[in-house]
Image: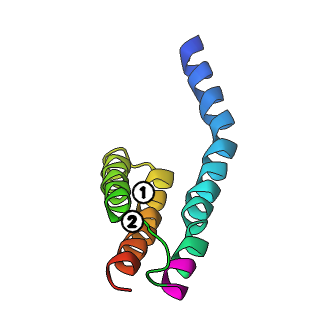
Amino acid sequence: MPSKSHHRLKWIKQKSKPLEQAMLIVAIFEPLMTIPQIIDIYSHPGEGYISVLTWVLYAVASLMWLVYGLYNHNKPLILTGILWLIMEVLVIAGILWP
């Protein structure tokens, strides 16, 4: 007969399914919110100061989250890590090569 803790764990897993789905949506849309910044950088090169160091550090942090997501087989972290890296590389490229 399953223990109380087994039933509790099963209940938590069932309850977390909607949260998991919501986080996959956030993992997609949060990095995509950077697209207006990327468009602005490429549309108006050299018109504003954007710190390349800041975006490189963001990219390093995203890489670390991606590795952590891969290590833990966490789909939202893997997806958002990949998307953030793409966005950050586009920003960095736009800053360095206007």
For the residue pair 17 and 83, the one nearer the viewer reads as 83
Question: Residue drawn 56% across and 67% down?
Answer: 34
3D distance between C-alphas at marks 2 and 1: 11 Å
Relative side of 61 to 75, left or right? left
Q: Main secondary structure of the magenta part?
A: helix
User: In terms of sequence position, does the residue under pointer 2 or pointer 1 come before the other?
Assistant: 1
User: Which amino acid type corresponds to the residue marked 1 in the rendered image?
Assistant: Ile
Q: Secondary structure at mark 1?
A: helix
**Image height check: is 28 above or below 10?**
below
Question: Residue drawn 32% across and 78% down?
Answer: 96
Instruction: Tell me, for residue 78, which label it has, or none.
Output: 1
User: Which amino acid type corresponds to the residue marked 2 in the rendered image?
Assistant: Leu
Q: Residues within 10 Å of mark 1 (few under 14, many from 20)?
A: many
Question: Residue drawn 37% across and 57% down?
Answer: 54
The quarter of the displayed image where residue 89 is located: bottom left
The quarter of the displayed image where residue 40 is located: bottom right
| Quadrant for the N terminus in the image | top right
Relative side of 16 to 71, left or right? right
34 magenta-colored: no
Which residues lie in the magenta part?
Answer: 40-44
Label 2 close to label 1 by CB (< 8 Å): no
Q: Secondary structure at mark 2?
A: helix
Whether residue 85 can be seen here: yes
Residue 88 drawn at (x, y percent): 41, 67
Residue 95 drawn at (x, y percent): 38, 76
Instruction: Tell me, for residue 85, which label it has, or none.
Output: 2
Residue 84 drawn at (x, y percent): 45, 63
Residue 28 drawn at (x, y percent): 58, 63
| Quadrant for the C terminus in the image | bottom left
Q: Nearer the viewer, mark 2 or mark 1?
A: 2
Question: Residue drawn 42% across and 58% down?
Answer: 81
Instruction: Tell me, for residue 92, which label it has, or none.
Output: none
